[in-house]
Amino acid sequence: MSGPTIELDIKRLYLPGVVLHAPCPRCSKVATRDFATDYLYYPTTNEPFFTSFVCEKCGDDGNGEAFDVRVILEFCLRTDEPKEEI
């Protein structure tokens, strides 16, 4: 699915129920972002962009180490009408 790139004109986009996982490029431990409590910052649709994940294992200060992951946000809007069988 792809379509035109659309700037949503939203500073913060929360997505309850959406959780992404990505392996840390340094140690391979899987990092997680829960978009019910975290958000995408000025997102666009149908065009790849980078968002940060934090590896809790890496980092010298005990706060973890951030790394970027390329993601794409796609929306689907459809009617909820039953399909007619021919």
Image (tube, helix red, strand yellow):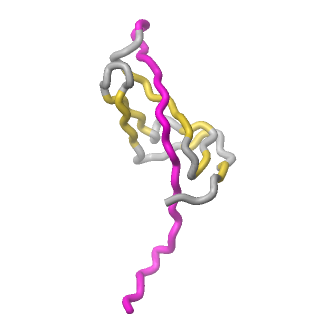
Residue that protrudes farthest toward the bottom in the picture: 86
Q: Position of residue 20 (x, y in %)?
A: 39, 40
Numbered disc total: 0
Residue that protrudes farthest toward the top in the picture: 60
Q: Position of residue 56 (x, y in %)?
A: 36, 19
Q: In this rendering, would 1 be left or right of 5?
A: left
The vertical placement of 83 against 32, above or below, is below
Residue that protrudes farthest toward the right in the picture: 9
Q: Residue at x 41, y 12 (%)?
A: 59
Q: Position of residue 31 (x, y in %)?
A: 36, 29
Q: Nearer the viewer, residue 1 or 15?
A: 1
Question: Residue 83: within the magenta?
Answer: yes
Q: Residue at x 37, y 25 (%)?
A: 24
Q: In this rendering, would 75 be left or right of 28?
A: right
Q: Which residue is drawn at 48% across and 46% down?
A: 15
Q: Position of residue 8 (x, y in %)?
A: 65, 49
Q: Which of 67 and 76 is in front in this view?
A: 67
Residue range corresponding to the magenta coloring: 60-86
Give the main secondary structure, helix, strand or loop, of the magenta stretch. Answer: loop
The vertical placement of 38 against 86, above or below, is above
The vertical placement of 35 against 1, above or below, is above
The vertical placement of 62 against 1, above or below, is above
Which image quarter: residue 40?
top right
Q: Residue at x 52, y 49 (%)?
A: 73
Which image quarter is the C terminus in?
Answer: bottom left
